[in-house]
Image (tube, grey):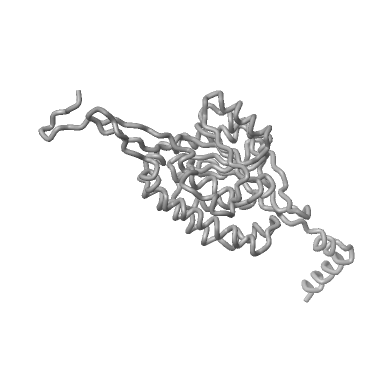
Amino acid sequence: MATKTIAKKATAAFSSNGHAGTIAAKRVEVLKTYKIYIGGQFPRTESGRYYVAKNRAGAPLANACLSSRKDFREAVVAARGAFGGWSAKAAFNRGQILYRIAEMLEGRKAQFVDELIKQDSTPAQAEAEVNLSIDRLIYYAGWCDKFQQLFGSVNPVASSHFNFSVPEPTGVVAAIAPQQTSLLGLVSVIAPVIAGGNSIIVLASETKPLCSVTFAEVINSSDVPGGVVNILTGKPSELIKYFADHMDVNATIYCGDDVASQKLVQEKAALNVKRVLFYNNIDWNSSDAETPYFILDTQEIKTTWHPIENIGGAKAGY
C-alpha cells in the first residue's frame, strides 16, 4: 500500500510540473536514416554528411546520405569486381535473377506504396508506379536470353569463314537516375543495364530518395551478387562530374535535360572515350520507356571470324 501511495505521489508531482504533458506534446519522431548500398553492404557515407528529405509541404520524411566522391570511387571498385562474374553468368540465369527481384518487390509492395504516398504521390499513382516497376523488371527478365538473337548477326563474307557479330556487355556503367520519380525511373535505368550483363552505380533521386534505398534492400535479399548494383543518394550537381570522368567507368547515363550538365558529361567522358547516353524527355510511365534497345545501349558488338572446315577436317580458305 505504501509503495502504491509513493508511486501515485511521484506521478502527480511529475504531472504537476508539466513535464509529462510536454514530452507527449513535443515528441520528435525518429526519422529513419536511409544508408547507401555499395558492394552488397549498407554503409553510411564516408563523409558523415546527410540531408533531410522532405515532402511538398515541407514535412521531414527521412535522413538521407549525401554521398561523396570517395563513396562513388568505392562503388566503382565494387562494380568492377562484380562485373566478371555477372557477365559470365548464363543469360537465362540473369533472367531468373531479375524475375526474383520482381518477386521480392511484389512481396514488399505495400511498403513502396506507402513511401511513394509520403513523397506526394496519390494512392492511385503510387499503386500504378509500383505495379509498373514490377512489370518492367519482368519485361527485362524475359529479354535477358533473347536480345542476343535480335541484335546479333551472321555476316556474309567473301572468304571461307563464318563471320558472327554478337553483343557483349560494355562493363561498369554509372547513371544519374531520373529525378522526378522515386522508384520507376530507378528501376527503368537499372534493369536493362544489368540484363545485358553490366554492373552499375546509380545516383537516385535527390528529392525522392526513399524508394531507392528500400529497393536496395530488395536487391540485397534477391540473388543479385554484391557489387552488381550499387545505389547512392545525394546531389547530382556535386557528383555528376565524377560519374563522367572516372577512368574505370565504361559508360555514363544521364537522365535529365539540363544542357550544362549534358555538356559537362560529354567533356569529362572524353578522357577515356566512355560511352555517353542521355535519356531526356522520356515518359517513364509509357511503353516507350521499355525496349530492348535500352539493353543495346550498353553493349559492345564483337565480331568473330571462324574458318570453315572441310568434312575431312582440313581447314579451307587459306
Up/down of 164 relative to 216, above or below: above
| Rendered location of residue 28, percent (x, y) | 77, 56
Does residue 219 appear to the left or right of 316 in the view shown? right
Which picture quadrant has residue 57? bottom right
Report the residue at 78% width, 58% height from top. 27
The mark total stands at 0
Quick one: which residue is furthest to the bottom in this view?
A: 1
Residue 158 in sight from this viewpoint: yes
Residue 218, image x, y percentages: 52, 53
- Name the foreground residue: 3 vs 272: 272
The one nearer the camera, 263 or 174, is 263
Q: Splitting the image into 4 quarters, where does residue 165 fall?
A: top left
Query: Which quadrant: the N terminus?
Result: bottom right
The front one of 154 and 255 is 154
At a point 69% along the width and 51% down the height, the residue shown is 62
Classify 77 as above or below 146. above
Q: Nearer the viewer, residue 54 or 173?
A: 173
* 74 lies above or below 146: above
Q: Residue furthest left?
A: 312
Is residue 213 visible from the viewing direction of this image?
no
Residue 53 position, x and y percent, is 71, 49
Quadrant of the image for the C terminus? top left
**Could you say where residue 31 lies in the image, as x and y percent from the top left?**
70, 53
Please give left or right for residue 236 compared with residue 37 in the image: right
Q: Which residue corresponds to the image point at 68% horizontal and 62% vertical from the top-left? A: 122
